[in-house]
Amino acid sequence: MKQLFIFALALVTVTTAFAQNDSTTNSKKKDWSKVKLGRRADDHFMVQVGYDGWAATPDSISIQGFSRSFNFYFMFDMPFKTDPRFSVGAGLGIGSSNIFFHNQFVDVASIENSAATLAFTDQSGGNHYKKFKLVSTYLEVPVELRYAVDPENTNKSWKFAVGVKTGLLLSTYTKAKDLENNANQVINSYIQKESSKKYFNGARIVGTARISYGVFGIFGQLQATSFIKSGAGPAVYPFSIGICLSGL
């Protein structure tokens, strides 16, 4: 969690420094209100692939492996008329997260949802699944404050953005593959899926930050609201760090 806050703080600091430096350098050289933006890329499409985790995870939860996310957004870009280096980006898209567990069963469909709390069952002492993951998918509305060093040619410019996105939970399910014994030998090869949204908050708020050069960049995000409902399990806060492609 600290790393993400440091990342966002550093991004804001760098953006401010660029803005102040450019303002000092160009205040007498260029009238930004007359800049022509007809040919620039407005980052209408944004694709993100990230490494995922949960902040504030208790010792009873065993997350292990390459947990990952995939996000895709269509964005509108609205430059400031007085200074087109700054703009507001807003759009709509889909965000998904795959969290992998080690020798643990997450019972999202616990006895047909009769249990009051979400069970994270330790299976390290006996039969367990070779692979087990929890998948969540959201419909999301991202909003960003953007800054481009060269607003006329953003495909060859440093770009910075901080923002927030709200999400509506579309689905949550677990996927288990290949039952093994305590010697890690497969005793039953099959795939089991269980789906339920009972234990999870239906909406979320996420803080975001990214830095890019041209179409390539890195991003970070941290969920401000707990993934699991209050009283239904531990308060955990999903985060993601990864690469971003943006353009068009």
Image (cartoon, rainbow, N blue to C red):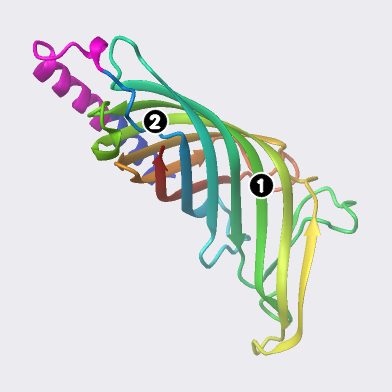
For image coordinates 71% across by 48% down, the residue present is 233
The answer to whether any part of residue 38 appears in the image is: yes
Instruction: Give the mark, 2 or 1, whose residue is nearer the N terminus.
Output: 2
In this figure, which residue is indicated by the disc labeled 2?
42
Quarter of the N terminus within the rendering? top left
Which residue is most to the front? 39
For image coordinates 13% across by 12% down, the residue present is 27
The answer to whether any part of residue 55 appears in the image is: no
- Label at residue 137: 1
Q: Is residue 222 above or below residue 172?
A: above
- Residue 16: say if magenta: yes
Q: In this view, does 248 lie above or below 18?
A: below
**What is the CA distance from the residue labelled 2 to the residue labelled 1?**
26 Å
Are there few (<14), some (14-19), or many (20+) residues within 10 Å of tag 2? many
Q: Where is residue 207 in the image (x, y as percent from the top left)?
A: 48, 34
Report the front residue among 190 and 125. Answer: 190
Q: Give the residues drawn in magenta, as a range.
A: 13-35
Quarter of the image where one finds residue 94: top right
Q: What residue type is labelled 2?
A: Asp
- Residue 93: say if magenta: no
Q: Where is residue 69 in the image (x, y as percent from the top left)?
A: 54, 53
Q: Is mark 2 on a helix, strand or loop?
A: loop
Q: What residue type is labelled 1?
A: Thr
Q: In this view, does 128 lie above or below 40?
A: below
Report the front residue among 121 and 155. Answer: 155
Q: Where is residue 247 in the image (x, y as percent from the top left)?
A: 39, 39
Q: Where is residue 203 in the image (x, y as percent from the top left)?
A: 68, 34
Q: In the drawing, does residue 232 fall left or right of residue 93?
A: right
